[in-house]
Amino acid sequence: MRRFVVLTFVLLVSVVSPGAAQEVKTDQDKTLYALGVALSDRLAPFALSPAELEMVKAGLTDAVLGHPHKAEPREYMGKIQELHTARAAVVAAAEKKSGEAFLAKAAGEPGAKKLDSGLVITTLKPGTGPSPKATDKVKVHYHGTLVDGTVFDSSVQRGQPATFPLNGVIKCWTEGVQQMKVGGKSRLVCPPDLAYGDRGAPPRIKPGATLVFEVELLEIVQ
């Protein structure tokens, strides 16, 4: 975490300049704007308010312009870590609350089955082939969303199936896909403990997030 924060600070300082243009017109503008967006992803876990972001920008501007620092990063690294942990915990608590309600609703839908782990699985299309083992490599199509319907990853949208060892993915997949048969399609609702937990996978997946996948098992790869 400490190296992550230092790297983020260095990268952001290297690209910040005063009086940055508000309009994005040229291809160069778009390139620099996209760079800013990419770097800002590293700050997502801090859940900064607009006022807090202004304070961060003030520090970056002072560093770029060579002005005296009002606080030194090395002295405050511990507090930065504390802020990161505290903000992540708040986000995780809110995500878990909404996720629990979503899981309860999903478990009550027709055809849904809640496993002991908390995973809720619904068969959308029965398969006719064999079921994979945890040690198998599988070829699948999948569509992953948050509980609000936001898509965070989708082989369907990319138009290219994914192949991976079943024991090399999140626990929800390892357990859920073993419940399927080749040719089948299922909906997996994954509690955070079976997904990315309290760490999440920022910026797309928040700490404590419940995830929803529609998975089509195409093949057990030999």
Image (cartoon, rainbow, N blue to C red):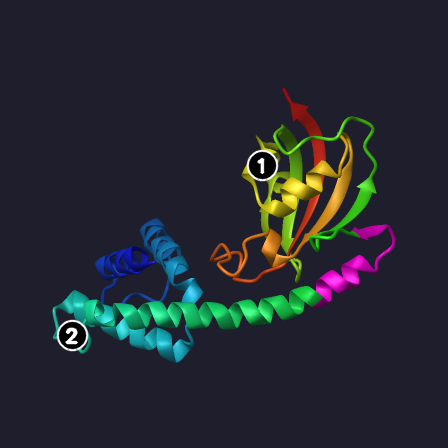
Q: Secondary structure at mark 2?
A: loop
Going 47% across and 67% down the picture, which residue do you hit? 88
Q: Position of residue 221 (x, y in %)?
A: 63, 23
Pointer 2 local density, CA inside 10 Å: few below 14, some 14–19, many at least 20: few
Residue 85 falls left or right of residue 198: left
Q: Which residue is mark 2?
A: 69
Q: Is 34 rendered above or below residue 219?
A: below
Which sits in the foreground, 175 or 200?
Answer: 175
View extreme (front): residue: 116
Q: Which residues are magenta?
A: 101-113
| Residue 146 found in image quarter | bottom right
Residue 179 falls left or right of residue 50: right
- Decide if residue 184 is in sight here: yes
Mark nearer the N terminus (2 vs 1) = 2
Q: Position of residue 115 (x, y in %)?
A: 75, 51
The numbered disc on residue 194 is none
Residue type, label 2? His
Residue type, label 1? Asn
Is 13 contained in the magenta span? Answer: no
Going 34% across and 53% down the picture, which residue do you hit? 35
Location of the N terminus (image quadrant): bottom left
Which sits in the foreground, 67 or 92?
Answer: 92
Q: Position of residue 151 (x, y in %)?
A: 61, 52
- Decide if residue 19 is in sight here: no
Q: Position of residue 31 (x, y in %)?
A: 35, 50
View extreme (right): residue: 110
Q: Is 19 rendered above or below residue 216?
A: below
Which sits in the foreground, 148 or 114?
Answer: 114
Going 83% across and 28% down the picture, which residue do you hit? 128
Q: Which residue is mark 1?
A: 167
Going 54% across and 67% down the picture, which residue do you hit? 92
Q: Nearer the viewer, mark 2 or mark 1?
A: 1
